[in-house]
Structure formats: structure tokens, C-alpha cells
Amino acid sequence: MKLRPTPLLVILLLAAPAARATVRLPRLVSSHMVLQRNVKLPLWGWAAPGEAVQVSFRGATAQTNAGDDGRWALTLPPQQAGGPFALTVRGTNTVQLTDVLVGDVWLASGQSNMEWPLRDAAGGAAAVAAANHPQIRLFNVPNCAERRPLAELAGGEWQPCTPQSVAGFSAVAYFFGRDLQQQYKVPVGLIAAEWGGTVAEAWTSAEALGKLPDFQPKLASLAQQTGSFAEQEAAYATRLSNWQRSPEGQDRGLLPGQPTWADPNLPTTAWKTMPLPGIWEASTPELSDFDGVVWLRRDLTLPAAAAGQPLTLSLAQVDDADSTFFNGVAVGGTRGYATPRRYTVPANLVRAGRNVVTVRVTDTGSGGGIWGKPADMSATVGSTTVALAGEWQYRPAYTPGTQPRPPYPGGAQNEPTALYNGMVAALHPYALKGVIWYQGESNAGRAAQYETLFPVLIRDWRTRWQQPALPFLFVQLAGYMADPALPADPDWARLREAQRLTSLTVPSTAMAVALDLGNPDDIHPRNKLDVGRRLALAARRVAYAETTVPASGPTFEKLTTTGNQLTLSFGNLGGGLVLKPAPDGGSSFAVAGPDRRFVWARAAVKGNTLVLQAEGVPNPVAVRYAWGNNRPATLYNKAGLPASPFRSDAWPRQPAP
């Protein structure tokens, strides 16, 4: 049977060609935007194939025709800073953009420390309240992982900087942009494209990444896959849901009609043990790739005087969520891997002798367990404090091997090219002044690879924007995690070195040192103000050619040996060297002889050099400074900027003693 078209359907069919011919612009080209000053301005959009498109701005006009694929692109002549202005796009329809500024545009990218919102930074409430800056504009790129490059962003819009628009915006990017706007008195546009916990290869294009042998097999596998990340994740969610409803997917610690695994009388002789605090993937082979529910138990012995008194239970941090029980009774629960757990146990639950603490941990991805400082795991009742760090019993809620495996265990956002495709590809060719970057934590276990990968990413972005000298400024990893008493060679030190070498070998780059801005107990230090400020100093030097601005701490240049002493020479003296005492009374300098065994050394400033000496090292040949996870920053210049951690040797990593 054939249907006769209704009058309304006829109207819609006749209108369809006109609708397809409507000129439209990408989200990035819109009202309230900032266009880059003093360079040719590429603009683009879509229209009907062959349709004539004309763009007018500040008395200049350019025109072109849409290609066979409907995309059009043209270039406006360079413009001086100013605004607000109107920009008009004409095809078969007219698009009028208003409140357009011309100034400097910066792309801010990386992982969670770049993503960290202003409202949660140190001093964030006051900074948000004062953030009325009509000359600063913000564009937040939504998180999006894709297998192929997108022509358009998944969302986002330009907004003037107000307390409302900036509260959830990148704190580092805001402080950076505010400093530059105040310095140069021109509009500043900030495009934030970041995603916490992501690796550098996810931000790199397939063309660039394919030149690196390490990533070729994974790229080949991705190329053979059908369906989007979202479709594959949806299919996995269905499999997981079916498994969760099956007998194999039930939490055996909560089975109806049986004692819960929080019951203090439950026999646990078959349970295994793991050390806490710690992430179970690192300490427990059985759980090396396990995301799900694990029950943790520990006996707690209290003196007679504690009976019938309220107790404070401290459990450091739990990754990612917990339900906590004391003697079988729930006493608290929290979601959030970085939130300290501190629960009050009612007096009627506390008894003399044996008590049982049980924590049901739900890990939603990546690391799982109770983590933090051992001192933050304790039970306090009255004047008695009992340490809870050490061996805990554990048992997974179900057999790990029965759970369906996700298609992307680290999340689709960590697949090679995924974030370049979903969050970067649609940004070019929008003209930029430069890039600021804060990332590396997620690549810290692969520092040697990062030494090649990071420069490839920089060159890739410069190629995409057709700006071979695009300023690329980045933050070196801040201090995080404890260090052993003796000199060590951890992953974070090696990653920082890869970053430092990039700043020395890749032109038009600069590195902001953040060692002294870190927090040993939190991978997200809250001082984002000084991070932004140091990036702005680097920008003044690299992007704005203020060659006399101190933008870096002392940079190691040369080592000279005289007997049992080493003399170090530096560049970027910034008025002279400053040696500060370490807060722990120790040293951040270590020297080694030909045996390659490093020993803490005494350091003294002598003119514009540093002299080192160590007991038991009669013939020193190498030095390492702040080489660790969180060794104190003690070397500065008189401009107040810290030296980067460095080493003079090129020795491979030695096995831990």
C-alpha cells in the first residue's frame, strides 16, 4: 500500500533542501569568543555543497564556497586586540555573532591537576567571588573519547569569566590567564580540554602515534574494531548487568539467610592477607587487575577501660567507596577515592578485648583498596590509640575470573588517540597563542617511553595547527608520596627527568617546576595559584619574548670534580643561588662514586656555584638533586623560583637494595 503525502509532509520535503543549505558554525566559533590577535584567522563551518559563504569582521570580508562534503574554510586578515565586535556569516542564511573579542587564546590540556576546578583550589572561594573579568573568556570542552577524529565537539560554549562560569573551570588555566590579562591588558581566551587520570598517548593523533613502535599493535587493533567506544561500553554494561543478576555475580558477603562477612563471629581461616594502606593491584597478585568489591577485616584489641566508650575510627582514604562495620554493625560509608574516612563508633559497640573492623570496598576502576599514610589508620578511644596499619584479611565478594572483562580496562579515555579524536581534533585550526599542559602522573611508570612520546605529542599538535613554533608550556610533576630514608630512584623522579629533557631539547617549550607545591599525601595539591603564576612567567619569556623576565629556577649545566668535592654550575641564576634548609633536616643532594652508590651530601653556595661533599665518598663522580617522589625543594634562585630535580649521570636504574 502506498501512502499519499499529507500537505504538511509536502511542506517539510520542500523545505529540506533549504535546511540542508543553512550555514552553520562550529561550537568554537560563536558569540563571546576571543580570536587570536596579529595572525591570520582561519574560520570554518558547514553549508550546502558549493554554497557561497561570506564572512565580515571589522571591515574585512572574505568569501569561499563549501566543498563537496559541505565544509567551508576561509581566512580573515590579522587583527589588533580589542572589542567587543560583531562577526557576520552569510550564505543562504545569515549568522550574526556578537561580543567577539580579539586578544590571546590559550589551550589548557592534560589530566586531573589541569582539570582541578577553581572552587576546590586553595583560596578558591575568594578567587571565585572576585572573578568578574569581562576581558577573559572561557570555553570548557566536554569529556569525549572517540575512535575516529570528530569534526565537531560534543558540546561547549564561550562564556565571559564570572563567578558562576569560572567556579568549575580549570584553576591552573584561570590563574594563568588572569596573570597574562593583567600583564598585557588584552583579552584572553582560555580553552580547557582535560580529563583526569589520562595518559599522553590518548591525546596524540593516530598519524603521529603510528610512528612509535610501542603503539603500533594497539593502533592496529583499534583500526579493526567496529562500533564506537560508547557502543562497546554499552554492550559491556549489558553483559555486566546480566552477570550481576546471576549466581556468580552475587556478593557472597551479603547472601540472604547467611551471616554477613562483617559478622565478628564469622570463621575467616580461609581468608588471605594484604598489607594496608596500599592499593591491592600493587600488593596482591590475585587482584592485580580486579575492579569490584573486596571485603577487608582486622581484629582490634582494646583495654578494659575502653569498653562502653565512643571510638573514633580513621581509615585514611578508600578507593573508591566503602561501607564500614564495627563488630558487625554499620558505622559509616563514603564515596570518593580522595576523601579521608573518619567514623564515630557508638559507645555501646565498643568492648574490651577483641573487636572486629570490617570494610567493604567497592573499586570502580584503576586502583582499589585503602591508601594513604599508615599514621592515618587508627582507632582512638579515650587516651588510647591503636594503629590499624599492617596486615588485613581480605576476600573478594565473588570469584574474580567470573566477572566480564571491560573492553577498555583503563576506560576508553585511555585508549591511544581517543582524546585527540574526541576533544582536540575539532579545535584546530582555531588560531592559538600557545598551549599549557599539566599531565604525566598516569605515564609515571613508563618514563623512558614518555621521553619520546611527549615530544611527539608536542610536534603533533604543532603540525595540526600549522604553527611549528607554537609555544608549549608544561608543569613538571609536583611532589607526591613518601620517600625512603636512603637515596632512591622511583618512577616519579624518572618521569620528571623526561619532562626536563623535553624542555631542554624541544624548541619553544618551557617547564614550570612544581616540586615545592606538592602534597605527599595527595596527588592533587591545592596550590594552583603558583602553578598558574609560574606558567605565566614561562609564557612571558617564550610566547611574549620578554627575555629578561626570570621564568625558571636554576638549571644545572656543569659538574667539576676536585678531590672529594663536586662543584656544580647553573644557568638562570635569577640574581644568585639560594639554598634553603630541608624541613626534615636532611639533604636533597646525593653524590656517588664509581660504585654508583648514592649517599646524602652536604651542600654550600660558593658564589654562583654549589659545592657538595659526602662522608664515605672520597671520589665523587655523579650528583642527583631532589631525586625522589617528594624530596624537599631546597635550591632556588633569588627570583624565588625552584630548580628542577636533576641528575648528572646517565646510569640505568639499579635494583632496589
Image (cartoon, rainbow, N blue to C red):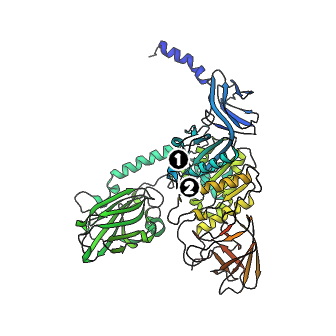
Between 584 and 123, which is closer to the camera in this rendering? 123
Q: Which residue matches tag 2?
A: 113
Q: Quadrant of the C terminus?
A: bottom right
Mark 1: secondary structure: helix
Residue drawn at the location 76% of the way across and 53% of the way down:
546
Badge 1: how crowded within 10 Å, few (<14), some, or many (20+)? Answer: many
Between 623 and 53, which is closer to the camera in this rendering? 623
Question: Which image quadrant is residue 35 in?
Answer: top right
In the rendered view, does 306 fall on the left or right side of 630?
A: left
Query: Which circle's residue, 1 or 2, is located before the other in the chain?
Result: 2
**Amino acid type assigned to the residue bearing label 1 in the image:** Val
Q: Where is residue 168 drawn, in percent x and y?
A: 51, 46
Residue drawn at the location 59% of the way across and 66% of the way down:
492
Question: Which image quadrant is residue 432 in?
Answer: top right
**Amino acid type assigned to the residue bearing label 2 in the image:** Asn
Q: CA distance from mark 1 to mark 2?
A: 18 Å
Q: Is residue 276 visible?
A: no
Q: Which residue matches tag 1?
A: 128
Q: Where is residue 632 drawn, in percent x and y?
A: 59, 70
